[in-house]
Amino acid sequence: MTRGGAHTAARAAARLLGLALLAGVSATACGDPAGHGTARSPSPSPATTAPEELCTRLVAHWSREALDGGTYGDYQSMGLSNGQYEILRSVVDAARAEKKRHGADAADELIDRETRAGCTEWYRSGGPGEGPWQ
């Protein structure tokens, strides 16, 4: 990936993360619309994104990029943790083999399926650890 491409990819990942964080903050706001500060609990918001769903979206996106581009980028420039990057590498390896055997559509379906399974399992077992590399 070129230096300019890495910066563009990093900006895209940062925008996705920023939108997800903004959605999470918006979903946790309390009070009535007039700002009277009522003590009621916030109602669930469809804008709230679960960590495994965000993982699935990011890893699937970058898996497709890696499959189409033929190479992996740096996990930090993609906005991924080390664990998410490991899921990506496994998914892309499987998708490459699937694409050779059954074509691009089958590889695309495999990316969706395997990314969701990998992210769900990863967060079921605790997700990222204490360090940003995990």
Image (cartoon, rainbow, N blue to C red):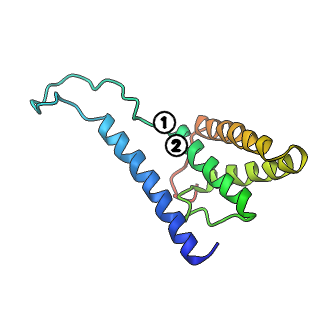
Query: Which quadrant of the structure image shows residue 31?
Result: top left
Q: Position of residue 111 (x, y in %)?
A: 71, 43
Q: 85 or 124, which is in the foreground?
A: 85
Q: Position of residue 121 (x, y in %)?
A: 65, 36
Q: Is residue 88 left or right of residue 134?
A: right
Residue 50 image label = 1
Q: Position of residue 113 (x, y in %)?
A: 71, 36
User: Residue at the location (62% across, 41% down)?
Assistant: 119
**Separation of disc 1 and disc 2 at Cα?**
6 Å
Label 2 element class: helix
The quadrant of the image that shows the C terminus is bottom right
Q: 101 or 53, which is in the foreground?
A: 101
User: Residue at the location (57% across, 55% down)?
Assistant: 81
Residue for badge 2 = 54
User: Residue at the location (41% across, 35% down)?
Assistant: 48
Q: Is residue 23 left or right of residue 113?
A: left
